[in-house]
Image (cartoon, rainbow, N blue to C red):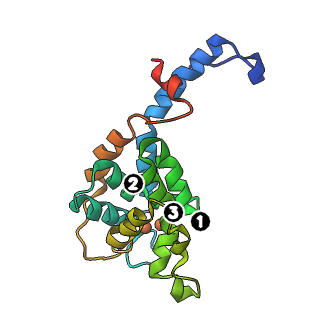
Amino acid sequence: MAERAKFREMKEGTKEDWAIIGGEYRAFAKGLPDRVLDHLKLLDGDFGGFPVCRLEHSLQTATRAHRDGRDESYVVMALLHDIGDTLGSYNHPEVAASILKPFVSEELHWICQNHGAFQGYYYFHHLGMDKNARDAFRDNPHFEACREFCEKYDQAAFDPDYESEPLEFFEPMVRRVMAKPLASLYAKAIAEE
Ligand SMILES: [Fe+2]
Ligand SMILES: [Fe+2]
C-alpha cells in the first residue's frame, strides 16, 4: 500500500508527511494533460442543438487556428476553450480559462476567459440580448485579440463539412504546453524533485 501522511489535522503535519504528499502531488500533476484530454472527450456527441458536436467544434476551432499559423499555446487554448461546458453550464469560459491559466500568456488567458461575451456578437440579438455586450471591454488591451479569435476561429467552427484534425493531432501540443506551469502557487513544490 502506498505510504500516507499520519496527521488528523493539518496543523499536526510533519516534514515526513509532506514529503509523502509532495511526491504524490508531483506524480499526479504530471497526469494533468491526460485528465484534460479525457475530459475533452466528454464533449463528443454532445450537440446541444448545434450543427456539430462540442468536440468537433473544439477540434475545428483549434484546426482553423493551427492552419492560420497560430503558435502551439494559442492552438491549445483554441482546443480547450469550451472544455468547461460540462461543469460550467453558466460560466464555461471561466472554467477553461482557469485550467489554462498556469500555462499560457495573460492575453491567451484573457481571450479564453472572455470569449463568451465576444461570441455573443454573432447571436445574442437572436435571443433578445445585446449583441454588442463585448463593447464593455473596448478599452481592454486584449479586446482586438479576443475579437479576432471569435471572428476567425470560434464563431467559424460549426461547419459539418470541414475537415478538422483529429484529437490525436493535438495531443502532443497539449502535453508540451501543459508540461510545466509558467506560474503557480505550487511551483516550488513541483520543482523540488
Ligand atoms: Fe464558448
Ligand atoms: Fe466555442
Local packing at callout 1 (Cα closer than 10 Å; few below 14, some 14-19, many 20+) is few
Could you tell whether 122 is left or right of 177 in the image?
right
- Which badge, 2 or 1, comes first in the chain's sequence? 2
**Up/down of 123 relative to 88, above or below:** below
Task: Give residue 9's position: percent from left, percent from top.
Answer: 78, 23
What residue is rendered at 35% in x and 46% in y?
Answer: 174
**Disc 2 + disc 1, Cβ < 8 Å:** no
* Mark 3 and mark 1: Cα distance apart in space: 15 Å
Residue under numbered circle 1: 89
Query: What kind of element bears circle 3?
Result: helix
Query: What kind of element bears circle 1?
Result: loop
Per the rendering, the mark at residue 15 is none
Residue under numbered circle 2: 77
Residue under numbered circle 3: 114
* Mark 2 and mark 1: Cα distance apart in space: 19 Å
Amino acid on which the number 2 mark rests in the picture: Met
Task: Give residue 60's position: percent from left, percent from top.
Answer: 31, 66
- Which badge, 2 or 3, comes first in the chain's sequence? 2
Amino acid on which the number 3 mark rests in the picture: Asn
